[in-house]
Image (spheres, rainbow, N blue to C red):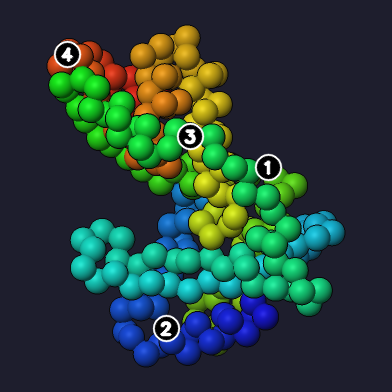
Amino acid sequence: MALKRLNALWTRLIRDPQYPKLYRDFIHEYEQLGHMKEVVAENDNSEIAYYMPHHGILRPEKSTTKLRIVFNATNPTNNGLSLNSIQYNGGLVQNDLFTIMIKFREHPYTFTADEKMMYPMILIHECQQPLLRLLWKESPEDPVKTFEMKTVTYGTVSAPFLATRTLLQLSRDEEKNFPSAAPVLRENFYMDDVLCSAASLIYAKALKNQLSSEE
């Protein structure tokens, strides 16, 4: 099924001159950034694997990311099951949006921010990566290659939980180093967006510096 979808994808790609390049660029960038890796058949010892079809969404109005690739983890295998059908969603570990907005209005100085590329920043255990495979080829005539996603992947049921639970764990692990930012991670994040307020401009800047620290 994944191979049929890949061939159908290329039928659509070649209709638009800019579409193939954008798709290639996305795949190449993901590999170069370490978000996915090529699977070499001779070294593949996986007993179970799942192949996700994928397609692109063109966003010509965007100045940076004009193409977003969507992975389909609901595609059933020959036994009728998909990756999403056998995953738990993990539940909610963040405050609800109403609570966050109330806290946002608590103090006179406010700021918002978002976690850049949150999903690709979180690694998946190697034993689980074969369940996040995809097929790709550089052109309709080129050989098909197999890749594995190494990070939390858009389109999987567990992705929101894995991302938010990682933020929660990070706040606990790093609280001694970032005592002001840790409670913000726990209480003021809604998915990858932070909405925070502070009693003074100085404290707001201190929070901002801790949240954006790369140490």
Q: Tell me, yes or no, whether the two marked residues, 1 and 4, touch with CB atoms within 8 Å.
A: no
Report if residue 204 is visible in the image. no
Sooner in the amino-acid sequence: mark 2 or mark 1 = 2
Relative to 41, 30 lies left or right: left
* Looking at the image, residue 129 lies above or below residue 186: below
Residue 125 is tagged as 1
Kind of residue at badge 4:
Ser
Q: CA distance from mark 1 to mark 4?
A: 42 Å
Mark 3 touches mark 2? (CB < 8 Å)? no
For label 3, the crowd category at 10 Å Cα-Cα, with few meaning under 14, some 14 to 19 and many 20 or more, is: many
Vertical side of 141 occupied by 157: above or below: above
Describe residue 80's horizontal placement relative to residue 148 as left or right: right
Q: Nearer the viewer, residue 100 or 5?
A: 100
- Which numbered disc, 3 or 2, marks the residue closer to the eye? 3
Question: Which of the 4 quarters of the picture holds residue 107?
Answer: top left
C-alpha separation, residue under disc 3 versus residue under disc 1: 23 Å
The secondary structure type at the circle numbered 4 is loop
- Alpha carbon distance from label 2 to label 1: 33 Å
- Residue 170 lies, in percent from the top left, at 51, 25
Mark nearer the viewer, 4 or 2? 4
* Amino acid bearing label 2: Leu
Q: How far across and how far down the image is residue 201, in percent?
A: 15, 16
Q: Name the residue beneath numbered marker 3.
A: 94
Between the C-alphas of marks 3 and 2, the distance is 39 Å
Distance (Cα) linking label 4 and label 2: 52 Å
State the residue position of label 4.
200
The residue labelled by disc 2 is 13
Check disc 1 and give the amino acid type.
His
The percent coordinates of residue 84 (x first, y second) are: 65, 60
Sooner in the amino-acid sequence: mark 4 or mark 2: 2
